[in-house]
Image (cartoon, rainbow, N blue to C red):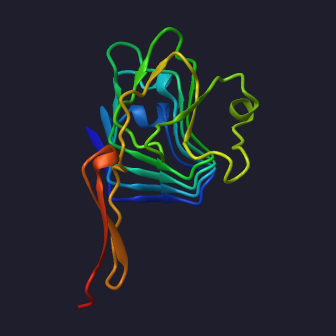
Amino acid sequence: GAIRLESVTLTGATAGLTIGPALNAPSQRIDIIDSLVQGNRIGLNVIGSALGNMRLTLRNNLFTGNSLALLIDGLPNGQPRIKLEHNSFEGNGIALKALNFGNRTLKIQQQWWGSVSGPQWLPLSELTCINSVAPAPGTVVQEIICGLGNIDAVPFSKVPAGRRIVKPGEAAKLETGIGPSALNDDAVMASS
């Protein structure tokens, strides 16, 4: 069986969603797609070592305003079973904290880290990472990734991946292209 969460909002919780042994029994796959994870202490808490044969896919989600957007504690055995595809991390205290990977690597290329410069890397021994407490607001432009050597986030996206729903009368920023040659324009949605 499969669990698919699409266009959902996880907001204002201690942990927006915890994925671990309790969800493993009835399901072979969990997909979280086109969703908003906002304003949580921990946005998603993934207990990877307890996933067994289950596959987890996070695609085109927006993580914003969380103290810790994504915590991944361990990786499942066998082939890669955690896939992150085209997610946006913006305005979080810490974007990703990766623990207990041993000599294995989590591949998370093509994510938007709040800056065209990509994420800011900190070792797990850094006080910010140990306590999962973000630096003072406004002191860090890029999203922070805690954990070195076992995360492959390059190449990273140069534009946000998530989509914002624009209401009539609001301005939307339209972006075309990647990098310095990108064209930016504002468009206002017509009222109906």
Which residue appears farthest toward the top when viewing the image? 103
What residue lies at 35% left-to-right and 40% top-to-bottom? 157
- Count of labels shown? 0
Q: Is residue 32 visible?
A: no
Of 105 and 10, nearer the camera is 105
- On the rendered image, what quadrant is the N terminus found in? top left
- On the rendered image, what quadrant is the C terminus found in? bottom left
Relative to 170, is 178 above or below? above
Residue 127 screen position, x and y as percent: 76, 30
Relative to 76, is 16 above or below? below
The answer to whether 85 appears left or right of 43 in the picture is left
Relative to 110, is 186 above or below? below
Quarter assignment of residue 85: top left
Residue 143 screen position, x and y as percent: 55, 42
What residue lies at 41% left-to-right and 43% top-to-bottom? 112
Residue 185 screen position, x and y as percent: 30, 67
Residue 168 screen position, x and y as percent: 31, 84
The answer to whether 4 appears left or right of 154 in the picture is left
Of 67 and 22, nearer the camera is 67
What residue lies at 29% left-to-right and 52% top-to-bottom? 182
The answer to whether 161 appears left or right of 68 in the picture is left
Which residue appears farthest toward the front when viewing the image? 181
Q: Is residue 191 visible?
A: yes
